[in-house]
Amino acid sequence: MSGLGKLRPGPGIVPLERETTAVRIAAALRAEIAKGALPPGTRIHEVDFTVAFDVSRHTLREAISLLVAEGVLTRMSFKGVAVAKLSAEDVSDIYATRRLIELAAIDALRDAPAAALDAVLAAIDALTGLSPQTDSEAMNDADMRIHKQLVAALASKRIKAAYGAAVRESQILLFHAYRPKDVASAQANHAAFAAMLRQRDFAGARAQLELRLRQSERDLIAALGT
């Protein structure tokens, strides 16, 4: 034990700053993919992105590896890396995971601390308070905050991580499936959802959420053909 205090970073240890830069680049690329700037199938050319981010190829490759592990990017034989193209089976699998977790979260709200329900309701109120002219990206962000607050009611870091991975994959297609005309109906659906939760009608809220998740799954599968 006495020798542990003498350990010092050596030349083979990756500096924390470099790791942080890679994480930030991964977040920036993920955001570009989520808003549709990098559609499925888009090649990630190292030279272009090292110049754009003003980083080394090594740092960019670290960021790319993070996104490959998430399923957001995919490595192609002899063709480098590209934004992943999801199949209908992929989307169904993602939404099976989401339903399993989110519907369990509704059940958990019955006995969860009041703060957990309040956090979900606050996120819903933020979405329903948005302007009808809100763009798809902002609407999507507000919607995802609701779902993440809901999953937080399960109070499990491992479930939260699994849910996050599923959501990040679905972001590849979500922007393309989300149309401006959906804003008003989304707000109405969420307002009804909030009313059920406030009345502690968890069975009704659970049924409504399942219907919305299944519709979102159908929308994303339809978007594969566009």
Image (cartoon, rainbow, N blue to C red):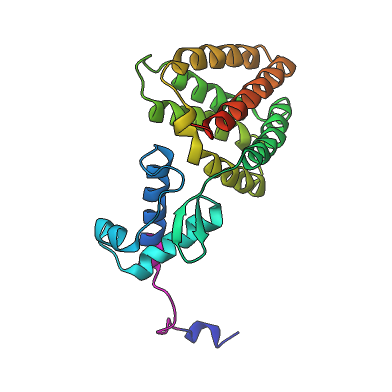
Q: Is residue 156 left or right of residue 81?
A: right
Q: Residue at x 51, y 60 (%)?
A: 75
Image vertical order of residue 12 relative to residue 222, above or below: below
Q: Indicate whether 26 appears above or below 183.
A: below
Instruction: Return the x and y of residue 154 as percentages of the image width and height.
Output: 67, 37
Q: Is residue 84 magenta?
A: no
Q: From where the camera sits, is residue 114 visible?
A: no
* Residue at (57% x, 87% y) in the render: 2
Where is residue 57 shown, x and y percent of the image? 34, 68
**Along the horizontal axis of the image, is 34 left or right of 111?**
left
The image shows a total of numbered marks equal to 0
- Towards the viewer: 52 or 197: 52
> What kind of secondary structure does the magenta stretch mostly adopt?
loop
Residue 11 drawn in magenta: yes
| Front in this rendered view, residue 21 or 28 | 28
Magenta stretch: give its range.
8-20
Give the image location of residue 160, x and y in percent.
61, 44
Q: Is residue 102 visible?
A: yes
Query: Is 168 placed above or below 69 here?
Result: above
Name the residue: 50% across, 25% down. 123
Q: Position of residue 140 (x, y in %)?
A: 46, 29
Q: Which residue is pictured at 29% across the width and 63% down the height?
A: 47
The answer to which image quadrant residue 218 occupies is top right
- Location of the N terminus (image quadrant): bottom right
